[in-house]
Image: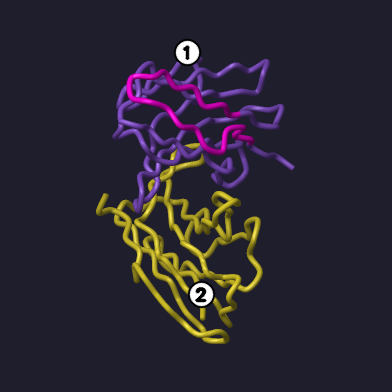
Chain colours: A yellow, B purple
Protein backbone atom coordinates (compact mmCIF):
# COMPACT_ATOMS: atom_id res chain seq x y z
CA UNK A 1 0.00 0.00 0.00
CA UNK A 2 1.65 3.21 -1.14
CA UNK A 3 -0.64 5.28 1.11
CA UNK A 4 1.60 5.06 4.15
CA UNK A 5 5.33 5.33 3.77
CA UNK A 6 8.13 5.09 6.27
CA UNK A 7 11.67 6.30 5.88
CA UNK A 8 14.35 5.24 6.06
CA UNK A 9 13.86 1.51 5.58
CA UNK A 10 17.15 0.74 7.30
CA UNK A 11 19.19 2.85 9.68
CA UNK A 12 22.33 2.24 11.67
CA UNK A 13 23.18 4.79 14.32
CA UNK A 14 25.51 5.14 17.25
CA UNK A 15 24.59 5.15 20.90
CA UNK A 16 23.73 8.64 22.10
CA UNK A 17 22.79 10.05 18.71
CA UNK A 18 19.42 11.53 17.94
CA UNK A 19 17.55 9.86 15.12
CA UNK A 20 14.16 10.55 13.57
CA UNK A 21 12.00 8.02 11.81
CA UNK A 22 9.51 9.44 9.36
CA UNK A 23 5.95 8.35 8.67
CA UNK A 24 3.70 9.87 6.01
CA UNK A 25 0.16 8.88 5.02
CA UNK A 26 -1.89 10.17 2.12
CA UNK A 27 -5.40 9.22 3.29
CA UNK A 28 -5.94 11.97 5.88
CA UNK A 29 -6.55 9.28 8.46
CA UNK A 30 -7.17 10.76 11.89
CA UNK A 31 -5.32 8.14 13.89
CA UNK A 32 -1.64 7.31 13.66
CA UNK A 33 0.48 4.96 15.70
CA UNK A 34 4.06 3.91 16.30
CA UNK A 35 4.89 0.36 17.33
CA UNK A 36 8.11 -1.47 17.84
CA UNK A 37 8.44 -5.16 17.06
CA UNK A 38 10.88 -7.32 18.97
CA UNK A 39 11.29 -11.08 19.20
CA UNK A 40 9.35 -12.40 22.14
CA UNK A 41 7.43 -9.18 22.67
CA UNK A 42 5.24 -8.93 19.59
CA UNK A 43 4.20 -5.38 18.83
CA UNK A 44 4.32 -2.77 21.55
CA UNK A 45 2.75 0.65 21.23
CA UNK A 46 5.13 3.57 21.67
CA UNK A 47 2.95 6.61 20.93
CA UNK A 48 -0.29 7.32 19.17
CA UNK A 49 -2.18 10.31 17.90
CA UNK A 50 -5.90 10.88 17.42
CA UNK A 51 -5.48 14.04 15.33
CA UNK A 52 -3.02 16.77 14.54
CA UNK A 53 -1.50 18.24 17.71
CA UNK A 54 -2.96 15.42 19.86
CA UNK A 55 -0.55 12.72 20.96
CA UNK A 56 -0.50 10.24 23.79
CA UNK A 57 1.86 7.72 25.30
CA UNK A 58 1.55 4.03 24.67
CA UNK A 59 3.05 1.09 26.48
CA UNK A 60 6.77 1.89 25.97
CA UNK A 61 7.23 5.66 25.43
CA UNK A 62 10.46 6.23 27.37
CA UNK A 63 13.28 7.59 25.22
CA UNK A 64 10.97 8.56 22.36
CA UNK A 65 9.36 11.81 21.30
CA UNK A 66 6.64 12.37 18.71
CA UNK A 67 4.98 15.33 17.09
CA UNK A 68 2.06 15.75 14.75
CA UNK A 69 1.86 19.25 13.38
CA UNK A 70 0.16 17.99 10.20
CA UNK A 71 -2.39 15.21 9.83
CA UNK A 72 -0.31 13.32 7.30
CA UNK A 73 3.00 13.20 9.17
CA UNK A 74 3.90 11.51 12.43
CA UNK A 75 7.66 11.46 13.02
CA UNK A 76 9.22 9.47 15.84
CA UNK A 77 12.43 10.77 17.41
CA UNK A 78 14.84 8.86 19.56
CA UNK A 79 16.42 11.62 21.59
CA UNK A 80 19.56 9.72 22.59
CA UNK A 81 19.60 6.29 21.04
CA UNK A 82 20.41 3.25 23.18
CA UNK A 83 21.14 -0.33 22.12
CA UNK A 84 17.85 -1.45 23.66
CA UNK A 85 16.11 0.63 21.00
CA UNK A 86 17.43 -1.63 18.27
CA UNK A 87 14.20 -2.88 16.76
CA UNK A 88 11.86 -2.81 13.80
CA UNK A 89 9.56 0.19 13.98
CA UNK A 90 6.15 0.21 12.32
CA UNK A 91 3.95 3.19 11.73
CA UNK A 92 0.23 2.64 11.19
CA UNK A 93 -2.83 4.71 10.52
CA UNK A 94 -6.57 4.22 10.80
CA UNK A 95 -9.56 6.20 9.67
CA UNK A 96 -11.51 6.03 12.90
CA UNK A 97 -11.66 4.43 16.32
CA UNK A 98 -12.10 0.70 16.09
CA UNK A 99 -11.15 0.62 12.43
CA UNK A 100 -8.33 -1.63 11.35
CA UNK A 101 -4.84 -0.30 10.86
CA UNK A 102 -2.88 0.05 7.68
CA UNK A 103 0.80 -0.45 8.36
CA UNK A 104 3.85 1.04 6.76
CA UNK A 105 6.69 -1.17 5.57
CA UNK A 106 8.73 -0.61 8.70
CA UNK A 107 12.13 0.81 9.61
CA UNK A 108 14.81 -1.55 10.82
CA UNK A 109 16.93 0.44 13.28
CA UNK A 110 20.23 -0.79 14.65
CA UNK A 111 21.94 1.10 17.45
CA UNK A 112 25.63 0.25 17.80
CA UNK B 1 -4.82 -4.03 32.12
CA UNK B 2 -6.23 -5.43 28.94
CA UNK B 3 -4.21 -8.13 27.25
CA UNK B 4 -4.31 -10.50 24.33
CA UNK B 5 -2.98 -14.05 24.52
CA UNK B 6 -1.99 -16.23 21.63
CA UNK B 7 -1.31 -19.63 23.03
CA UNK B 8 0.67 -21.12 20.18
CA UNK B 9 4.05 -19.53 19.60
CA UNK B 10 5.09 -21.74 16.72
CA UNK B 11 2.91 -24.10 14.70
CA UNK B 12 4.26 -26.47 12.08
CA UNK B 13 1.86 -28.07 9.61
CA UNK B 14 2.01 -29.98 6.37
CA UNK B 15 0.26 -28.63 3.32
CA UNK B 16 -3.46 -29.40 3.21
CA UNK B 17 -3.67 -29.71 6.99
CA UNK B 18 -6.29 -27.71 8.84
CA UNK B 19 -5.29 -24.74 10.93
CA UNK B 20 -6.65 -23.25 14.10
CA UNK B 21 -4.81 -20.52 15.99
CA UNK B 22 -6.06 -19.51 19.38
CA UNK B 23 -6.60 -15.96 20.61
CA UNK B 24 -8.06 -14.87 23.93
CA UNK B 25 -8.42 -11.41 25.33
CA UNK B 26 -9.09 -9.98 28.73
CA UNK B 27 -11.73 -7.25 28.64
CA UNK B 28 -15.37 -7.42 29.57
CA UNK B 29 -16.73 -4.64 27.40
CA UNK B 30 -17.29 -4.08 23.71
CA UNK B 31 -14.37 -4.91 21.49
CA UNK B 32 -13.40 -5.00 17.86
CA UNK B 33 -11.24 -7.95 16.88
CA UNK B 34 -8.65 -8.38 14.18
CA UNK B 35 -6.25 -10.88 12.73
CA UNK B 36 -3.18 -9.64 10.90
CA UNK B 37 -0.61 -11.60 8.90
CA UNK B 38 3.05 -10.75 8.45
CA UNK B 39 4.88 -12.56 5.67
CA UNK B 40 8.65 -12.86 6.06
CA UNK B 41 10.31 -9.48 5.72
CA UNK B 42 7.05 -7.64 5.18
CA UNK B 43 4.68 -5.42 7.13
CA UNK B 44 1.46 -6.53 8.77
CA UNK B 45 -1.61 -6.90 6.60
CA UNK B 46 -5.20 -7.21 7.69
CA UNK B 47 -6.65 -10.72 7.28
CA UNK B 48 -10.08 -10.16 8.75
CA UNK B 49 -11.96 -8.18 11.35
CA UNK B 50 -15.03 -8.45 13.56
CA UNK B 51 -17.07 -5.45 14.66
CA UNK B 52 -20.56 -6.80 15.26
CA UNK B 53 -23.18 -9.16 13.86
CA UNK B 54 -22.40 -12.66 12.65
CA UNK B 55 -19.67 -14.02 14.94
CA UNK B 56 -18.21 -16.05 12.09
CA UNK B 57 -16.23 -13.74 9.85
CA UNK B 58 -14.52 -14.55 6.62
CA UNK B 59 -11.35 -12.91 5.46
CA UNK B 60 -8.94 -13.03 2.60
CA UNK B 61 -7.15 -16.15 1.32
CA UNK B 62 -9.70 -18.58 2.77
CA UNK B 63 -9.23 -17.61 6.41
CA UNK B 64 -12.10 -17.29 8.84
CA UNK B 65 -12.45 -16.57 12.53
CA UNK B 66 -15.13 -17.13 15.11
CA UNK B 67 -15.90 -14.74 17.93
CA UNK B 68 -17.12 -16.51 21.06
CA UNK B 69 -18.04 -13.80 23.51
CA UNK B 70 -18.53 -16.12 26.48
CA UNK B 71 -14.99 -17.43 26.06
CA UNK B 72 -13.40 -14.09 25.16
CA UNK B 73 -11.94 -15.83 22.16
CA UNK B 74 -11.41 -15.08 18.48
CA UNK B 75 -9.75 -18.11 16.94
CA UNK B 76 -8.44 -18.11 13.39
CA UNK B 77 -9.12 -21.08 11.11
CA UNK B 78 -8.33 -22.33 7.65
CA UNK B 79 -9.50 -25.72 6.36
CA UNK B 80 -6.44 -26.43 4.22
CA UNK B 81 -3.18 -24.52 4.49
CA UNK B 82 -0.70 -23.91 1.72
CA UNK B 83 3.04 -23.39 1.79
CA UNK B 84 2.39 -19.73 0.98
CA UNK B 85 0.58 -19.34 4.32
CA UNK B 86 3.93 -19.53 6.09
CA UNK B 87 3.97 -16.30 8.08
CA UNK B 88 3.45 -14.82 11.50
CA UNK B 89 -0.11 -14.22 12.62
CA UNK B 90 -1.19 -11.58 15.11
CA UNK B 91 -4.46 -11.26 16.93
CA UNK B 92 -5.44 -7.74 18.01
CA UNK B 93 -8.20 -6.18 20.08
CA UNK B 94 -9.54 -2.66 19.81
CA UNK B 95 -11.39 -1.25 22.80
CA UNK B 96 -13.96 1.46 22.34
CA UNK B 97 -12.96 4.90 23.54
CA UNK B 98 -9.29 4.10 23.94
CA UNK B 99 -8.00 6.36 21.25
CA UNK B 100 -8.29 3.86 18.45
CA UNK B 101 -5.31 1.87 19.63
CA UNK B 102 -5.08 -1.87 19.21
CA UNK B 103 -3.56 -4.31 21.66
CA UNK B 104 -1.67 -7.08 19.91
CA UNK B 105 -0.92 -10.61 20.96
CA UNK B 106 2.64 -11.85 20.79
CA UNK B 107 2.10 -13.58 17.50
CA UNK B 108 2.08 -17.15 16.25
CA UNK B 109 4.64 -18.26 13.73
CA UNK B 110 3.17 -20.70 11.22
CA UNK B 111 5.48 -22.90 9.17
CA UNK B 112 3.87 -24.96 6.42
CA UNK B 113 5.91 -27.81 5.00
CA UNK B 114 5.42 -28.57 1.30
Q: Which residues are magenta?
A: B5-23
Q: Is residue B91 above or below residue A68?
A: above
- Verify whether residue B15 appears in magenta: yes
Q: Is residue B80 above or below residue A6?
A: above
Secondary structure state at the residue bearing disc 2: strand
**How far separated are the C-alphas under marks 2 and 1?**
42 Å
Residue B26 located left or right of residue B78? right
Q: Could you tell me which quadrant the N terminus of chain B lies in? A: top right
Residue B46: quadrant of the picture:
top left
Q: Position of residue A66 (x, y in %)?
A: 53, 69
Q: Residue at x 53, y 23 (%)?
A: B75
Q: Residue at x 52, y 59 (%)?
A: A36
Residue B104: quadrant of the picture:
top right
Asked whether the residues under marks 2 and 1 belong to the same chain, the reply is: no
Q: Is residue A89 above or below residue B79?
A: below
Q: Residue at x 70, y 39 (%)?
A: B2
Q: Residue at x 53, y 41 (%)?
A: B107
Q: Is residue A110 above or below residue B77?
A: below
Residue B84 disc label: none
Q: Could you tell me which quadrant the C terminus of chain B lies in? A: top left
Residue B21 located left or right of residue B44? right
Q: Which residue is mark 1?
A: B54
Q: Which residue is mark 2?
A: A77
Amino acid sequence: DAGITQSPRYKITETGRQVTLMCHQTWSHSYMFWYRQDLGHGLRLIYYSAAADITDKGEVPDGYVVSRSKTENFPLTLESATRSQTSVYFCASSRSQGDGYTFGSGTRLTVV
Amino acid sequence: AQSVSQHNHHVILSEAASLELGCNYSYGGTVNLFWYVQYPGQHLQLLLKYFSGDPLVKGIKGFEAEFIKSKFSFNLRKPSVQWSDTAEYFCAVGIYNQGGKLIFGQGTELSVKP
